[in-house]
């Protein structure tokens, strides 16, 4: 596990622009991804995550260009996810400047993909992205969703995370669809549950609304904290979050 906590701005990208909504709905324009990534880098971000939220064939070339342009200006790890269906997709994104690749829907459809990525590129490249909703239908009370949270699967989120780790996933990006964009704080119960079953780093995502929301997520078990709206709207800087974590007795980079 990481000794110190990482702060990661997330940029949801559609057709070359950053977008943001609430519970993955009502997306609105939030700016240019390269400009925002550079701003967060200057503020002290430890990593940047790009999620191609439309991931259509016609938008894919735009994402490659965005990753390359960002990698030329931002010298911290870049994680890119959305629409990754094969090891060839991974190789192409790595070739354009990505450092880590997030997989979600394609891995649920074909779990072998996780192992294929880990075997070819190393576990550290493979980030399992989980869009999780609360559900009474699963043993844990949490279900995995696809298509930006719009489609529920029959997979228990904790069981799927465990399986993916066994297959070679090197990190879990755990996004609460229920909390996403609400600014009511992270789903601490979800973070704690993932921490309990995971031997790889857990990134908490979804719900950050104030500087004070991040320390509880770390105490619940997050190795890294990820946010979008509070950074895009200028409500918080990366520095604000790091100062709040330090004030709470948590070591940051």
Image: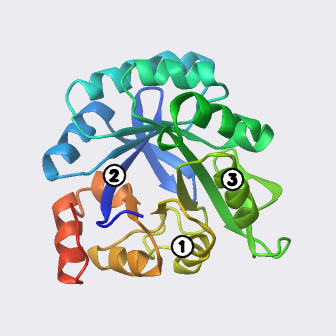
Q: Residues within 10 Å of mark 3 (few under 14, many from 20)?
A: some
- Can see residue 216? yes
Furthest residue to the left?
A: 42
- List x then y, in percent, for residue 177: 60, 62
Instruction: Say few, some or many: other residues with alpha carbon within 10 Å of mark 2 (under 14 / 14 to 19 / 20 or more).
Output: many
Say whether marks 2 and 1 touch (CB < 8 Å). Answer: no
Residues under numbered marks 3 and 1 in contact, where contact means CB atoms less than 8 Å apart: no
In which quadrant is the N terminus drawn? Answer: bottom left
Report the mark closest to the observer, 3 or 1: 3
Label 2, label 3: how far apart the Cα atoms are: 28 Å
**Residue 63 shows in this picture:** no
Task: For marks 3 and 1, give the CA distance.
Answer: 19 Å
Q: How far from the left and from the top, in percent, is residue 183?
A: 42, 70
The residue nearer to you, when weighing 35 against 8, is 8
Question: On the image, which quarter does residue 19 sit in?
Answer: top left
The answer to whether residue 14 is left or right of residue 146 is: left
> Picture quarter containing residue 130?
bottom right
- Residue at 31% over, 65% down: 5
Residue beneath label 1, please?
A: 191
- Give me the disc on residue 166: 3
């Amino acid at each position: 596990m990481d000794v110190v906590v990482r702060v990661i701005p997330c940029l949801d990208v559609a057709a070359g622009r950053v977008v943001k909504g609430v519970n993955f709905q009502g997306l609105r324009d939030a700016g240019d991804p390269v400009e925002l990534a550079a701003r967060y880098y200057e503020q002290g971000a430890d990593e940047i995550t790009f999620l191609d939220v439309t991931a259509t064939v016609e938008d894919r070339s735009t994402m490659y260009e965005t990753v390359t342009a960002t990698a030329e200006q931002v010298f911290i790890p870049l994680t890119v996810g959305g629409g990754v269906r094969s090891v060839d997709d991974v190789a192409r994104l790595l070739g354009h400047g990505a450092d880590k690749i997030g997989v979600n829907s394609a891995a649920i459809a074909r779990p072998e993909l996780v192992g294929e990525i880990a075997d070819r590129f190393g576990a550290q490249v493979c980030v399992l992205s989980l869009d999780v909703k609360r559900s009474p239908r699963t043993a844990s009370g949490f279900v995995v969703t696809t298509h930006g949270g719009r489609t529920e699967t029959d997979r228990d989120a904790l069981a799927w995370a465990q399986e993916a780790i066994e297959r070679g996933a090197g990190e879990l990006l755990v996004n609460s669809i229920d909390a996403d964009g609400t600014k009511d704080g992270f789903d601490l119960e979800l973070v704690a549950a993932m921490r309990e079953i995971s031997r790889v780093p857990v990134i908490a995502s979804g719900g950050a609304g104030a500087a004070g929301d991040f320390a509880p997520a770390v105490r619940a078990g997050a190795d890294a904290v990820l946010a979008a709206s509070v950074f895009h709207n200028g409500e918080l800087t990366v520095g604000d979050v790091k100062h709040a974590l330090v004030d709470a007795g948590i070591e940051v980079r």
